[in-house]
Amino acid sequence: MDYGFAVNRLLASGGNIFETLGITWESIVLHLFSLIVLTVGLYFLLFRPVKKMIKQRQEKVQKIEKENADLNEEVKQMKSSSAKVLSEAKKEAAAIHESAVKVANQKADEIVSEARERAKTLVEQTQREMDEERGKLRSEIEKQIADVSVAVAEKVIEKKLTPEDNRALIEKCLEEWSKE
Amino acid sequence: MIDVKAIGESLREKVAGAEVKTDKRPCGRIVYSGDGVLRIDGLQGVKYNELLEVEGGYRALALNLEEDSVGAVLFEGDDKVGYGDLAFSTGETVQMRVGQALLGRVVDPLGEPLDGMGAVAAEEHRPVEFPAPAIMDRAKVDKPLQTGILAIDSMIPIGRGQRELIIGDRQTGKTAIAVDTILNQRGGDVICIYVSIGQKASSLAKIVSTLRENGAMPYTCVVCSTADDAVPLQYLAPYSGCALAEYFMYRGKDVLIVYDDLSKHAVAYRTMSLLLKRPSGREAYPGDVFYLHSRLLERAAKLSEEKGGGSITALPIVETLAGDISAYIPTNVISITDGQIYLESELFNSGVRPAVNVGLSVSRVGGSAQCRAIRGISGQLRVNLAQYRELAIFMQFGSDLDAETQKTLSRGMKMTDTLKQRQYLNYSVREMIVLLLVSGSDLVDKIPERKMVAYNEGLLDYLRTNHADLIASVDPDAQVSEELRAKVLEAAEQYVNVTVGDEGAYGEEEAEEIAKA
Amino acid sequence: MKQEKCRAEVVLAMKADKATEEKIEAFVRARGCDGARYTIDPSIGGGIVIYIGDKVYDGSVKGRLASVKRSV
């Protein structure tokens, strides 16, 4: 109802629209002024923080991109160096193997020479034992011969010893003992 | 082949050379014979410890001289000598055959060969009882005798001319230490004499074959009396061994003599004394059982330069019963010797071999004779080990441990493992220095706990082949320089990397494979 | 030494004649004994063995042979 009334009044007024609408230049100025105030206020309160946030986002994305690039670089480098390390490790392994072989060889040599020495001493010892056995046998024979000879001598003397001989023997002994 | 003609020749020569003599000598008549003991009537002029000859060619030793009779002990033939037999005095004390020719031989206490290798070609004799060197003839013990056993050489060092007792229960490795010490003299300038007193013939045979197999016989003489020998021979054995040792000592040589063992010697002497009806004292030992051992061990000495500078190092062995070192014979011998190596069956059974109880073992004079290099390193060793043991006992209560305590414990355990040593595996001085340096450094933290023994053996092998010059550059008679220490540790680290690092690399590979799968 | 009890013991292979006995007697007396007791023992082969106190004088054939045997 009000709208109809207002439009009617506008049409009726004809020429002076502003007057019909009741708009004065002061109100326009006032409105302009308030618009400016609003714009400025919005700019400070909303636009600036949003802009800042976007800037930060951008920076972040850039940083991540850079990191990615770095990592890629590193991976590349690692790939190239791993080959080097591998070859070095192989070399080292070879050296260790060599030293182990050296240790083993030396041990083997030691064992062989020890065995040889032992064999030698065994032969020597057997030789000595044989000599010893021979010597023993010999002395055994000598002893047997001596025993038999003494037995024979005893028998002969018993039979042949005359009282004269006996007396001479006794006297000789007594003389000998008296001398000392 | 046997040359029959030569036999005839030699016999004829001998007969021609034989002197026909009419005997005239003091004699007595045996009025009692039993248990190897003789009572002889007459024999007025006989002297104490004189050798007697009994009709039939048997020998006896005059020990009890009384107003009109003599008590003597028979060395042999106690079943052949009877009442009424004549006993002649010889005017000699008991003599031991001595000479270079005895090395490599096994002889009885009178110098007669027992190894079946022919007559001993030594014509010199020495009385078995001989006064100990006088005070002025002695010098300070200043040269080490290396046993080749790390635990002993680092913490209980033995000097040449020292008397170090080896004491412990049966089956604790007493003889093993002595035998190892003899084996370690191979290639050195020390002459060794092993005296067995009343040992089982089987164990003695084992020892002789060990010595022979390891090439120790050329510088060793074994004087032996086994358990079935006459008691007087067992009594005589250590004195004869000592007489032989003196022969070499007075010629300026260094001698090592092992008496295995003196408790059996005391028992043999007790048997003789009781049979001779001498009064007995504590544990039925006669009153002079202390003098018995003190006069024997006093003959071990280091001679002064004027006397040739020779020495006798004595390693008497005494067996205890149930670890009782306060029994009569052990206390006696401990007080006579310059220190003791105490072996414990508990340690032995828990795998610590040699089972040396470091806390109870001491060496009273060896410290000054120790190699300077070892002295420098091992000073802290004893203290560290004591700390470890204390901590280990404390740990049994099972409380949570901080990292520091755990580290001390692990290091102590590794140190103990380092001191373990297989029998017949002797270390040279240089190897000992290397082992002590490595086991005392931070490097041990890298080695797994149970692998210490294997690591030590491997390390020495590795150094011997790859760094022989490094080992050769170690000077036992000087303090270990920082430079040398660094070099040794570097080489040891290399070995650690070779062995321990190997396992690490393998682990990574495995992990990768698992990841791929 | 108990001199008063001293009596020499002489062993012979066969009985000696008067002159020899006198010589033996003299020898024994010279060593402080007052007499000799004789024993005949053919097993000594010949010669003489005298025991005086704690001394033995062995001049028998058997003893000589034994000593030769020992030295061989």
Image: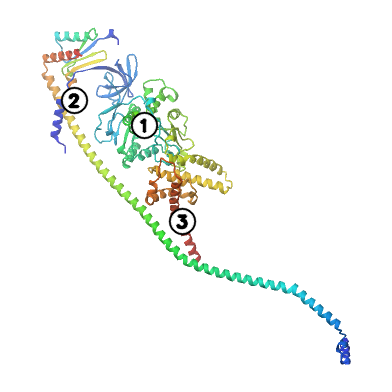
Residue A14, horizontal then vertical, whole percent: 87, 92
In the depicted view, which residue is nearer to us: C21 or B110? B110
- Pointer 3 indicates a residue of which chain? B
Location of residue B49 with respect to B186 vertically, above or below = above
Please state the horizontal and vertical placement of residue B364, each as a whole percent of the image.
45, 32
Mark 2 residue crowding within 10 angstroms, few (<14) / some (14–19) / many (20+): some
Q: Residues within 10 Å of mark 1 (few under 14, many from 20)?
A: many
- Work out whether disc 2 and disc 1 sit on a shared chain: no
Task: Identify which residue is drawn at 57% across, 45% down.
Answer: B398
Which amino acid is tagged 3?
Gly
Give the mark, 1 or 3, whose residue is nearer the N terminus. 1
User: In this orientation, which residue lies closer to the viewer: B128 or B283?
Assistant: B128
Q: Secondary structure at mark 2?
A: helix
Q: Which residue is mark 3?
A: B501
Q: Which residue is mark 1?
A: B312
Asked if one can make out residue B517 in the rendered structure from this viewpoint, the answer is no
The picture quadrant where one finds residue B351 is top left
Q: Look at the image and tell me in which quarter the N terminus of chain B lies.
A: top left
The answer to whether residue C13 shows anywhere in this view is yes
Residue B451 vertical position relative to residue B244 in the rendered view, above or below = below
Counting every numbered tag in the picture gives 3
Kind of residue indicated by mark 2: Lys
Determine whether label 2 and label 1 are within 8 Å by CB.
no
Q: Could you classify mark 3 by the number of other residues whose Cα lies within 10 Å: few (under 14), some (14-19), or many (20 or more)? A: some
Numbered disc 1: secondary structure: strand
